[in-house]
Amino acid sequence: MKVRKTKIRDLLLLEPTIHRDARGFFLESWREDRLTEMGLPAHFVQDNHSHSVKGTLRGLHYQIEQPQGKLVRVVAGEVFDVAVDLRRSSPTFGQWDSAVLTAGNQWQFWIPPGFAHGFYVLSEAADLLYKCTEYYLPGGDRAIQWDDPDLGIDWPLAAGCAPILSSKDAGASRLRDAPTYP
């Protein structure tokens, strides 16, 4: 597996070795010994599966208590995946980076604790799987406005189409008003 650093410290893009033949393909999506050598945590407590239709935008989500690290991948379709650094002590606080994750490239995005996460579905539908380092805690769940001008995320929205949002995401806080991490 290749590990690529991003413009934000600790945020990583993982490119697995894919063994393809006439039958299909095989890859290792998680191998504790190799990935812990690369600095990823060995302990995940929850796996999540999100299915979304084209034009859905989920995020930017995070937990203020029990911050979650997430190892994200797409098993069907294509998404524009985004992470925002919410660590005030970080030189990249308030900055974002992204990756296009597809069922074809099988890339994985490591989003450490201290980041908000969101994605936008580019294909007709997409299935996103992610491992979490902490359990979901409803009372600690927070969201930042996906189109916060202070973040300036360049979402690849379909021309003339507003994204499909949950009520939580539609009413999310701006970064300047949101609780963040030390």
Image (tube, rainbow, N blue to C red):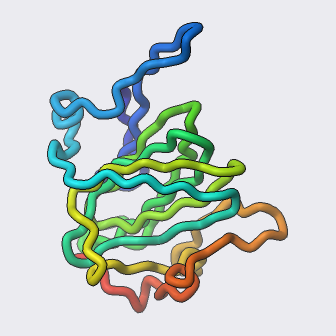
Q: Is residue 126 left or right of residue 91?
A: right
Which residue: 55% across, 75% down?
146
**Residue 31: % across, % down:** 24, 30
Residue 143: image quadrant is bottom left
- Dividing the picture into quadrants, the one containing residue 33 is top left
The answer to whether one can see residue 88 in this image is no
Q: Is residue 79 above or below residue 143?
A: above
With respect to residue 173, does 98 lie above or below?
Answer: above
The C terminus: image quadrant: bottom left
Q: Is residue 173 left or right of residue 1?
A: right
Image height check: is 5 above or below 57?
Answer: above
Q: Relative to 176, is 130 above or below?
A: above
Could you say where residue 77 lies in the image, as x and y percent from the top left?
62, 43
Split into 4 quadrants, where in the image is the N terminus? top left
* Residue at the image position 47 percent from the left and 71 percent from the top: 60
Front in this rendered view, residue 133 or 135: 135
Q: Position of residue 110 (x, y in %)?
A: 35, 48
